[in-house]
Image: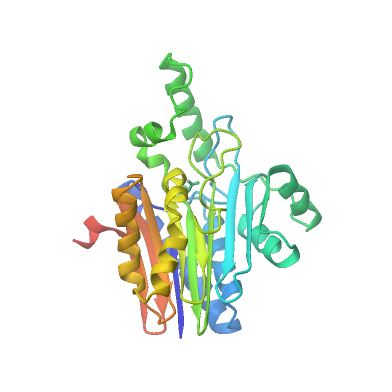
Amino acid sequence: MKRIIVHGGSGKWPEEKWEKAKEGVLEAARTGFKYLMETGDPVEACTRAVMSLEDNPIFNAGTGSVLTLDGRVEMDASIMRGTTLEAGAVAGVENIKNPILLARKVMEETDHVLLAGEGAMKFARSMGFEHYNPITEERKKKWLELKKKFESGRSTLPWHKMQELIKKHPELLSGTVGCVVLNDEEIVAGTSTGGVFFKLFGRVGDTPLIGAGTYANSFGGASATGIGEGIIRVVLSKTACDFMRVGVSALKVAEAVIDIVNSTVKLDAGIITIDRAGNIGFAHNTPTMPVAYIREDEEFVYISKEEKG
Ligand code: ASP
């Protein structure tokens, strides 16, 4: 039994970008599924799907990542194998093309789970990752616009409360990417992001935190998106996998954990899930979340509840 599901970030995608976002997630799911069929390796399939999303500048991961308060890109990523609970993650990495590949190197080449900042960069260079600037003109323009807006607002640091900032600018959140793959017995999950726009330098979200942004065990896998500050506090992805462990299906689980977010931290969130029986689920409390999934007999692509009717 083979399954793959990917997401392109919960948030508020402007309508003129819906088609491009849907094309992007479908292309990534197809890429991952192709590798899954050819190699039977869910780690490779998950990596390839996430790389496809990282390389697509419309998503907030890899190329096209959003900028920090001081105009740089600090990216986070993680990957986890459900059968062995091996995991790898990186936080706050700059100037590389594919953070998911670096997270995978941490999983496969080190005894650690999470490398951050300068140390992660040193590791990247010694693993042969070349210097690459992921900042796109569009993100730079947006950053300059925002900077001007905030500066002319006279207030010195009105954006220190991320929650308020995101409420005023929900469009800034869309774009983190993630993938869950099932290959017969094994489930793998991975997530990659540029984080949230205008974040403070050094801020680490949920994406590289195993259990929050990504989790997989032998019962299920999950990849989350939304405001990391909420996702971390409800340990969203691990909670989803715990529910799958007690037999709740992936679809119900996705809805249940978003309900938990809604009744506790009350912040934007979305999740994709697959359980070991092959059920696929996704849910979000934001207006949009591009999702594509593929199984042997079906290809499915989605962006908003509104569009579905
Ligand atoms: N969860 C990501 C973070 O907080 C952002 C997102 O999903 O858009 O870094």
Q: How many marks?
A: 0
Horizontal side, residue 73 vs residue 166: left or right: right
Horizontal side, residue 141 vs residue 91: left or right: left
Name the one closer to the observer, 78 or 61: 78
Which residue shows up at 56% across the image and 39% down it?
Answer: 203
Reply above or below: 25 against 280: above
Colour basis: rainbow
Name the one closer to the observer, 28 or 188: 188
Reply above or below: 129 against 203: below
Q: Specify the quadrant of the image occupied by residue 41.
A: bottom right
Q: In the rendering, at what x and y percent does residue 289 appear? A: 36, 55
Which residue shows up at 43% across the image and 74% down it?
Answer: 245
Does the rendering let one see residue 7?
no
Q: Specify the quadrant of the image occupied by residue 303.
A: bottom left
Horizontal side, residue 307 vs residue 83: left or right: left
In the picture as drawn, the residue positioned furthest to the left comes out as: 309
In the picture as drawn, the residue positioned furthest to the front comes out as: 246
Which residue shows up at 54% across the image and 39% down it?
Answer: 137
Q: In the rendering, at what x and y percent does residue 177 appear? A: 48, 57
Horizontal side, residue 14 vs residue 133: left or right: left
In the picture as drawn, the residue positioned furthest to the top comes out as: 154
Q: In the rendering, at what x and y percent does residue 173 appear? A: 42, 44
Reply above or below: 54 against 295: above
Which residue shows up at 38% across the image and 36% down it?
Answer: 166
User: Quadrant where the C terminus lies?
Assistant: bottom left
In the picture as drawn, the residue positioned furthest to the right comes out as: 126
Does the rendering let one see residue 29?
yes
Q: In the rendering, at what x and y percent does residue 145 appear? A: 45, 28
